[in-house]
Image (cartoon, coloured by chain):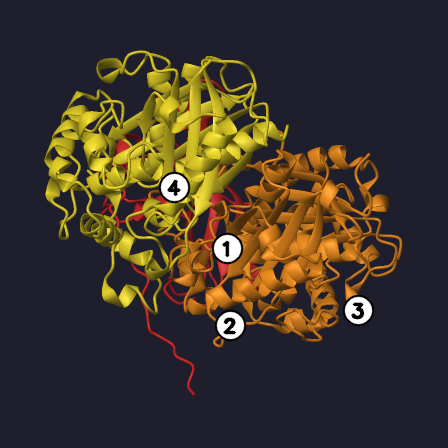
Chain colours: A orange, B red, C yellow
Amino acid sequence: MSVAIIGVGQTGYRRSFPDKSSRELIWEAARLALEDADMDIDGIDMVISGVAPDALAGEASVERTAMLGFGKPFLRINTGGVTGSSTVFAGNTFVKSKRARAVLVVGLERMGQATSSQQVFNTIFDPVYEKDFPLTTITMAALRASMLMRLYGYTAMHWAQIASRSFRNALKNPLAHLHKDISPQDVLDSPMLAWPIHRYEACPMSEGACAMVLVDKDMVGSRTPAWIQGASSITDSYAMGDRIHRPEATLVDLLSLKLAAKRAYADAGVDRPREQLRAVELYSAFSSAEAMAYPALGFCTAEGGPRFVEDQFTDPRLPVINPSGGPQGANPVSATAMVRIAEAALQVRDMAGERQVADVDRAVATGQGGATQFSTVCVLGKRQAA
Amino acid sequence: MDLVTIEGKWAFNYTYFAGESASRFFHELRENQRIMGTRCTKCKRLLVPARAYCDTCMAPTDEWKEVGPEGTLETFTIITTAFPGLPAPPIVMAYVTLDGADTALINLVHGLDLSDIEAAAQKLNTLPRVRVKFVDEPKGRITDFSFELI
Amino acid sequence: MVNVDGVYIEGAAIELSWADSRRNLMELIYDTVSKAVDDAGQGYDGIDSVVLAAQDLVDGRSLSSMVTAPAAGAYLRDEVRYSDDGAGAFAAAVARIEAGESERTIVAAWGRASEHDVEELSRSLFDRIFMAPLGLEELHVSALNAQRWRIDGGDDGAAAAAQARRGAAARANPRALHAGGRRSTPAYPLRDEHLPLWADAVAAVVISGKPSGVKLRGMGLSSEPYWLGDRGLAQAPALRRAAERALAEAKLDVGDIDLFEIDGMTLYDEAIALEAIGLAPKGQGMRALAENPRCNPSGGSAAGYGVPAMGLARIVEATLQLQGRAGTIQQGKPRTALASGLSVTAAQTHTVIILEAA
């Protein structure tokens, strides 16, 4: 059973939307996705939403006020950073199971309502053994970044180059939250948050909603599809300390992403990812998180990572990473992993406007969440997987 | 027309049960100033901090064993910016594998000169040996101890 | 129509407890999931997927599954967490098997009422602008529904008998909470004994496409609008539609079903639910609950209630009945059973699962 994305809707992303309720943001994204799909809500069999964590919005089930379409099956997902991609994958599952022919998936982030987000992020940690420490999404990334520098020779300049590239890509994306021409030196000059992470390596806090329409192949008709060729999700242990001495993969080897990529590539028939995947949308909330994804996705060896960063600026044959600007351009947390898939779908459908990469036959989108623990890989293509 | 905003506070009260294993771990911190791990019955790793089961094997743990008090730093960060609701910087936080343990444990590192962050980072990058240092009046919490460079 | 021939429940487990300080939340989860996997008898090796229902606020961890999912066997498996009810997670797990994405899946759901303030969490479910300032809780919505049902001519005379029967059923249920727990303060017309007994609940099942003891016959899901004024009070239209869909898929009439395990927060919600699924005529749900021992033989919400595990708890109880393993509350030899679960704000969504003895 082949499943296609035929509609993508995004509100665009900003620090906050004081002029729109949560309900209106969801409706706006859904309306745009349905319009793109040339469908109305009556054609949708099921709605799956993703919002996480509730605490960032300061409301439980913040999307519940926007039940789209009367009486439809409705489920809600919360898998932290991968909420958006988990939601798309759930839609894919229900279509593949033939329980639905068309599913509307929606992701909403309302964190503009939170005035202390890193304090909220601290409350995701184990209250018994860990919450007493200043563990946050930033320090968690910093613990890995320092390890990558020591093990593989990444420098502060590599982190700065990655961040600057994303910022400059976001200049071409009208939906992005930040439109700033940031140079690598600007990144290095920005304040240090937690060594070795500078402020401009961290993604912003954004609000906004994303929605997509997923249908089975009989419903595609004359529409322009992005076919879901492979979709896989893997969960790792929570305990970061348990992963340091693990023989099969250390704390900076993204084992969950590697296993997810292996499965998704197998389903999609991808065996030379560096050549076959033209556009790559990574859920990399920090430069170091992007570096960890390279070997897991088969773009280079772990040791070859710093070189791969440098080569991206000179070798046009390499995959284009985060043409949308990625999470550095906009990070509506709950929706970010869905936005990656939405952007990959636009690339495959040749609908990405000024940020369109040439000759995209296949694109890949990732999701990353929890204690670098939940990984998703989604391969999209112009054609159905063989 | 003004757009309405309404002030809110998202605070809920919880009483978390630490359970028997963590309680014993905390008891050992408070009464004996020692750090304990438990061994997985299947993979035989000594897991620190102590826990009732191994989530890799989905198998119970049995033997209790003391680790440390010395160990090796594995990775670290130095928090240099203040965030609302979190402790004031600069703070060094690190994963340390205590001698005898098969997993690493996170805690703060004290006693390091932080006047030059870059220099402190380079020193920690050598993965120095560290020692567990207990507070004067342990309360049976994970904050009863921290690490200091040997 | 979906071909559901081929999804089976291989193992099931449930535990209701209260403030057991010997175990933390993860250890509670680990114990019940291990029991379900042992019950299935295949070990962990064949399990490739984990589908969970858990809620951040209930668990007091802002990204619950980051800390809790590994306790349910998520390590290096395809795991997803629904912030929904356990029956919704069960439906999603069924779809995984049907889609060919998984051979064998763990479904688990939990909620530990002894760790948090249930009323405080309930208030957080209402939107900050219009409803929360009123101090609304979900049980107030149950009270509004109950009173509307009475105004509409519901046979309230049977309430005492219905409560007596479900209280006795809960006392007889070996898996019910028999010590501890607590109840909220009732709002008119509800009384103490009508309310759910808040508990620490964990439920788990193992499902696969391989023929086993209990087979999925049909399932249906539906939703209602958020605004209470937009809903059909005392009619549970989402449950009605979910049941219609599940029965249609099972090619069964409600009269063909031998046993019901219905999720409702209060006695009145359970009675209204029996009307919504078509078992009792309008206004006669309470009478059915009083007189039909095959409606909620577990004792329903009086046996112990821990959000969001209750839909899966109902599925576990139905499974045990179909296998003749329900113990002191076994109801003969039922061939078919209907279980339901509800979620989001004040039963805004419903899932109905129909099972049969294979």
Residue C210 placement, left or right of A354: left
Q: Residues within 10 Å of mark 4 (few under 14, many from 20)?
A: many
Nearest to the eye among marks 2 and 4: give it: 4
How far apart, in angstroms, are the residues tagged by discs 3 and 4?
Answer: 48 Å
In the rendered image of this protein, does residue C178 appear above or below residue A224?
above
Chain letter belonging to callout 1: A
**Proximity of marks 1 and 4: CB atoms separated by less than 8 Å:** no
Label 3 and label 1: CA atoms lie apart by 32 Å
Q: Is residue C290 above or below residue B138?
A: above
Disc marking residue A16: 2
| Residue type (three-letter) at the residue carrying disc 4 | Leu
Q: Chain of mark 3?
A: A
Task: Choose mark 1 or mark 2, whichever is in front.
Answer: 2
Quarter of the image with the C terminus of chain A is top right
Q: Secondary structure at mark 2?
A: loop
**Residue at the spot of label 4:** C239
